[in-house]
Image (tube, grey):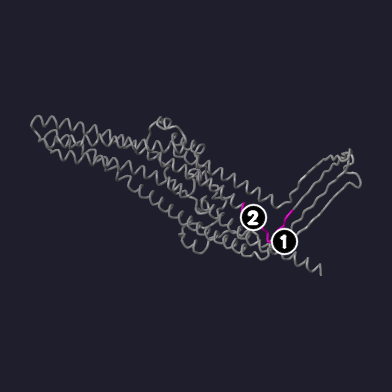
Amino acid sequence: MKTIKFSLLFALSTSVLSGCAVAPVEMSSQQRSVIPEQWSQGEGVPQEQALRVAPKEWWASWGDETLNELISKTLDNNTDIATAQANLRSAMAALSGATASLFPTANLGADASRNRQNGSSSESFGADASASWTFSFGGRDVSARRAAQASAHASELTLEDTKSAMTSEVALTYVQLRLAQTRMQIALQSEKSYKEAMDLTQWRYEAGLVSATDYEQAIAQYENARASIATTHHNILQYQTALSRLTVLPLANIQSLPQGPIPLPPENIAVAIPADVLSLRPDVQAAKENVRAAMENVRVAQADFLPSLSLTGTIGTAAATVGALGSSGSGIGALVGALSMPFLNWGDAIEATETQKANLDRAQADYTATLVGALEETENALSGIRASAAKKASLRKATQSSQLAAQLALQQYSSGLEDYQTVLTTQRSLLDAQDSEASNWADWAIAHIDLYRALGGGWMPPDKQERK
């Protein structure tokens, strides 16, 4: 009979523990249905992982030394990255604790005492070692460790995602700063042109060749140009303070950076995107790990429906003198086993299980949201790259034509062949054309930054892939 009971107990524990094996988190049919056919749906093969490059290497391919310096300082100093690193350390500590719970605990002790009674005294000495171990037939500790392992991996991925997000924000702010500085140059050139037009109009007005209306319009145009310079100064300062916050550098250091053009990515780098973008993106992987952790936490809660076995053992020695410790007859020992099972408190176990199942549903929903968000961001970034590329040639030609038209209009006005309205119109067109072209270059760079963020990091440029 005892043999039968033991066999049944062993079979029960084996079946429960085998059910705790980690099942891979696969995409549901709903999650797969939102992915376009041209997108890969794998799990991240080593060849595609090899296409990944570190943030510093990716941004170095843009060939802008100032951007490289800002990225490096961000990775070293950014507070969001520091917080993610601290969270990872906490998760790794929790994993260590969960791993330790799978093994017995042991303690060593020693004591000495002296008693005096009725003029006589006695001494006693002792040393002991104790160990205890608790085994859950529901696999509670095993599932708890697997949940901690998944959470630690999710924290590691979150750190990588934070690095991607922060370096992307720095690059975006840097591009916007360069665009604002380019607009400042355009504004200064416009101010100079409007000043020349105003001086010419003043001379013609004083000579009685034009009306006061033309002169007043020239003054208004010039003053508006000066006002726009002040606004652009404010925008530049905002981007500089943002970079100071992201890099944790003094504002004076940011303001002392050398000026330069809008940084641009390598040509055709968007065609070298890893096919398995969904599984490579850190936040998608982190969401998947959170689902796995939630699954294990459900098993942790369900384990409370099954009994637990606790074993406690003590071995030691006690004697009247230190020299007698360990001698024959001084040994003491004990072994205690206890089997416990919840009784009349299943309501708490049911509540805990349902709570963990709800957490699992939330994790699945978050995984789906992250998945479709990755698709949206990537498609939008690719569309932005195509749109900016399509406008490059036209905007360059528009700027050149507007510049020539403004020069001709001013020459003809000085000769009395055109009125001042034509001068105003061509100068405004030139300003708009210059601004549009600069904005498109910035949009081109920003779209690549958005793509970097959408893919969760950088990838190897085409020329390096071919050499590899």
Report, in whole angstroms, how far the alpha carbon at label 1 lies from the one at label 2. Answer: 19 Å
Q: Disc 1 on helix, strand or loop?
A: strand
Q: Residue at x 79, y 52 (%)?
A: 313
| Coordinates of residue 289 in the picture (x, y in percent) | 57, 54
Q: Which residue in the protein does label 1 denote? A: 340
The magenta segment is 133-148
Identify the residue shown where x is 67% and y is 56%: 142
Q: Nearer the viewer, residue 291 or 342?
A: 342
Hey, what amino acid is under mark 2? Ala
Residue projecting furthest to the right: 328
The residue where tag 2 is placed is 144
Q: Residue furthest front?
A: 118
Q: Quadrant of the C terminus?
A: top right
Residue 50 locus on image (x, y percent) = 55, 47
Earlier residue among tags 1 and 2: 2
Please, what is the three-letter code of the amino acid marked with disc 1?
A: Ser
